[in-house]
Amino acid sequence: MGLRSKGDNQLLDYKTQERFYNKIVERYLIFAADARRGDELNRKLACLNIAQDNANRDAAPTTQTVPNPADLINGKPDANELDAITMGMRKLREGIVASKSIDDFSIQAYIFCIRLSILLKHWESYHPAMCHLLQVMHPKYPLSSTELQEFAAYQVLDLACRQSDLAKAYSIRLALGLRDPKVDEVLKAIAHDNYFLFWKVKREVDGYKAKIMEFAGEEMKLHALKSIGKTYLSIELDSLEQLTDSSWSVLTEAYSVGWQLEGTKVVIRKPKPR
């Protein structure tokens, strides 16, 4: 079954959309089960607990599969399977848009696609889907208050962390009526280059938000290293690793910090002799 953008019309049919969605979910569940059984278990994308209370819509509760960070692994052997699932989700979204379908099923399908795409850090999938959900679907078929808060938070974080557009992030936060103290702290941390607050919040939020925050992680880490290098002569190793959210081996190998480790203390530079 091809893409709507390539001229394939099969997914214009509602029943076909539902069958195709069920196939995607089934394939995802098989993949997740294999990941749990395999040796790759320790290489999962994340191990954070995800609240699954958003699975039911207010108006008509339905059973919905909720992608969980613990289901996915970060390994090349499964890249083809993840690509197939991602492509399947794109086909489904194109079919739903082309058929102008906005109902419980289409919103459920979009929610599943967005959540899974976030866990895969595939912004090319979750960004357009999230915009369509909030800007096109929600005005015509309102999300529940819980769902609106959830996806508004994702959009605000994406603007701030991936797109580096704080002004628009604050604007969308206001427009969508987002009330999330953790998201507010992330915006504050980025605005003030507060890397300590950024890593603190990243450890406290759920797996979806943490995954989006990873887009800003590199910049925050580099800022932390520059600030530490200018401010300290030496620093305790555990403090350095906490402030940069990285192990000593990663800092020396990937960032070539050039600092010296003496026991549990990292010597950044020695005082100039008088």
Image (spheres, rainbow, N blue to C red):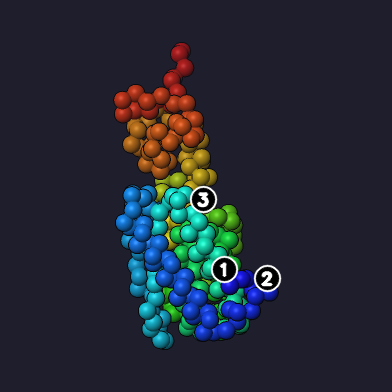
Labels 2 and 3: the sequence-earlier one: 2
| Residue 23 image position (x, y, % from top left) | 46, 73
Q: Is residue 43 above or below residue 4?
A: above
Q: Is residue 107 visible?
A: no
Q: Nearer the viewer, residue 115 or 27?
A: 27
Q: What element carries label 2?
A: helix
Q: Real-space Cα distance between discs 1 and 3?
A: 26 Å
> Do the numbered discs 2 and 3 sit on residues whose CB atoms are within 8 Å?
no
Labels 1 and 2: the sequence-earlier one: 2
Q: Is residue 162 left or right of residue 38?
A: right
Amino acid carrying label 2: it is Lys
| Residue 6 image position (x, y, % from top left) | 68, 70
Labels 1 and 3: the sequence-earlier one: 1
Query: Label 3: which residue?
Result: 216
Query: Label 2: which residue?
Result: 6
Q: In this view, does 13 lie above or below 27?
A: below
| Residue 199 image position (x, y, % from top left) | 41, 49
Q: Quadrant of the N terminus?
A: bottom right
Query: Label 1: which residue?
Result: 90
Which residue lies at the image location 37% right of the left edge and 41% below the top edge?
242
